Image: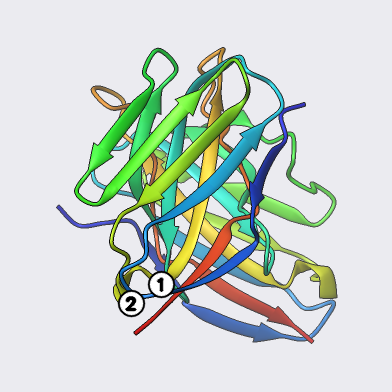
Amino acid sequence: EAGVAQSPRYKIIEKRQSVAFWCNPISGHATLYWYQQILGQGPKLLIQFQNNGVVDDSQLPKDRFSAERLKGVDSTLKIQPAKLEDSAVYLCASSPDRGRIYEQYFGPGTRLTVT
Amino acid sequence: KQEVTQIPAALSVPEGENLVLNCSFTDSAIYNLQWFRQDPGKGLTSLLLIQSSQREQTSGRLNASLDKSSGRSTLYIAASQPGDSATYLCAVLPGNAGNMLTFGGGTRLMVKP
């Protein structure tokens, strides 16, 4: 079974620029999560999707961050415009909709550096 | 609001030593607790998941315990090896079984040959 795929793996941009990250969850997983992990801290949930609907986006800075999951499969996370404090690793995770529904499987992450 | 703390933040031990990593959480109304491993530049790998009704889980040289009433969990690693060097994160799932994991800051472990 293929794992969660993310791209790009690394991205360097200047502040005020825009950036987008892509995630492809494990096949058949209905729930998809985006996390932000700042260096030296644990991941923080930004947004959770169930199929193509948003379940929780309470910690998403909506003035600059947006996310979508068209057709309930792949997802993109966008930052526009980026700030220095957005430098972090952005992790995508997915979980199944039956069986071990509370286990999350993580992708390798995208490391964003804002200069 | 649930807060998860891990102590120590960093730990360095010689190969072969047994060690304990600590995790504490402020709200005991949890559904489960998970321990993850994170290698540099990589995502998280789930090591052990303990349901709120369980006291411990074991996998190979790893043993995780849960004391929900005191808001504590420990991860015991037996006979540590250099390959165990990584960051270890604990995370709790709320008792209402929503899927919002709350993570601790992690313990960065270095096992020296």
Q: Is residue A111 visible?
A: yes
- Assign a secondary structure to mark 1: loop
Q: Please state, as top left, top right, bottom left or bottom right, where the N terminus of chain B lies in the image.
A: top right
Q: Nearer the viewer, residue B53 or B31?
A: B53
Q: Quadrant of residue A47?
A: top right
Tell me the chain of label 2. B
When the figure is inspected, residue B65 is found, relative to residue A13, above or below; the finding is above
Write the residue at 66% across / 31% down: B25
Q: Are marks 1 and 2 on the same chain?
A: yes
Gap in Å between the C-alphas at discs 1 and 2? 6 Å
Check disc 2 and report the residue beneath it: B82
**For residue B49, side relative to residue B6 (left or right):** left
Q: In the rendered view, tell whether residue B28 sits above or below residue B25.
A: above
Residue B85: mark in rendering: 1
Residue A75 in view of the camera: no
In the rendered image, the vertical position of residue A96 relative to residue A5, given as above or below = above
The image's mark for residue B27 is none
User: Chain under label 1?
Assistant: B
Q: Secondary structure at mark 2?
A: helix
Q: Residue at x 72, y 73 (%)?
A: A87
Note whether B9 is above or below A30 in the view shown. below
Work out which residue is located at the far left of the displayed protein and give it.
A1
Q: Residue B38: horizontal and vertical position, in percent?
A: 44, 63
Residue type beneath disc 2 = Pro
- Quarter of the image with the C terminus of chain B is bottom left
Q: Is the residue under label 2 in contact with that under label 1 (CB below 8 Å)?
A: yes
Task: Where is residue B61? Give x, y as percent.
Answer: 24, 52
* Of residues B51 and B100, the one drawn nearer to the viewer in this rendering: B51
- Residue A111, given in percent of the width and then of the height, sits at 57, 75
Pointer 2 local density, CA inside 10 Å: few below 14, some 14–19, many at least 20: some
Which amino acid lies under the numbered mark 1 shown in the image of this protein?
Answer: Ser
Q: Residue at x 63, y 46 (%)?
A: B104
